[in-house]
Image (cartoon, rainbow, N blue to C red):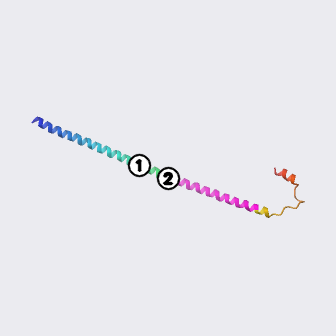
C-alpha cells in the first residue's frame, strides 16, 4: 500500500514538475517573442523617423539649390543683356580713344 501511495505521489509530482517546466518554457517563449516584437517596432520607428529627417533635409537642400539656380539665371540674364548692349554700342570716336598699347597695358 505504501509503495502504491508513493508511486501515485511520485507520478503526480512528476506531472507537476513537467507542467511547471512546460509552463516555464511557454513563458520564456512568450517573453522572447514579445521582446523581438518590441525590437522590431523600435527599428521600424527609428527607420520612419530617419526617413522623415532625410526627406526634410533633402527638401531644404532642394529649396536652397533652386534659390541658387534662380540667382544664377538672373545673373546670366543680366550678363546677356550687357553683352547685347555692348554689341549694339557705337565705338567711341578715335579722338577720344586711348592708343591700343596703352589700353592693353592698363587692362593688365
Which residue is the extreme one toward the left?
Answer: 1
Q: Is residue 76 magenta?
A: yes
Residue at the spot x=35%, y=45% of the render?
32
Image coordinates for residue 48, horizontal then vertical, percent: 47, 52
Image coordinates for residue 25, horizontal then vertical, percent: 29, 43
Residue at the spot x=57%, y=55% of the render?
60
Which residue is the extreme one toward the right?
Answer: 95
Callout 1 touching callout 2 (CB < 8 Å):
no
> Left or right: where does residue 16 sit relative to residue 86?
left
Give the numbered dot on residue 51. Answer: 2
Q: Is residue 39 magenta?
A: no
Residue at the spot x=38%, y=49% of the render?
37
Query: Residue 103 or 57: which is nearer the viewer?
Result: 103
> Left or right: where does residue 57 sit relative to residue 89?
left
* Cα–Cα gap, marks 1 and 2: 16 Å
The residue that disc 1 covers is 40
Q: Which residues are magenta?
A: 54-83
Residue at the spot x=18%, y=40% of the render?
12
Q: Secondary structure at mark 2?
A: helix
Q: Main secondary structure of the magenta part?
A: helix
Amino acid at each position: 500500500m505504501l509503495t502504491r501511495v508513493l508511486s501515485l505521489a511520485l507520478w503526480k509530482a512528476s506531472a507537476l514538475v513537467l507542467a511547471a517546466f512546460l509552463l516555464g518554457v511557454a513563458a520564456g517563449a512568450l517573453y522572447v517573442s514579445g521582446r523581438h516584437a518590441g525590437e522590431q517596432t523600435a527599428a521600424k520607428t527609428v527607420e520612419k523617423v530617419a526617413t522623415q529627417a532625410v526627406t526634410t533635409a533633402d527638401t531644404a537642400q532642394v529649396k536652397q539649390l533652386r534659390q541658387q539656380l534662380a540667382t544664377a539665371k538672373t545673373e546670366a540674364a543680366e550678363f546677356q543683356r550687357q553683352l547685347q548692349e555692348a554689341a549694339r554700342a557705337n565705338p567711341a570716336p578715335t579722338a577720344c580713344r586711348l592708343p591700343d598699347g596703352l589700353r592693353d597695358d592698363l587692362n593688365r
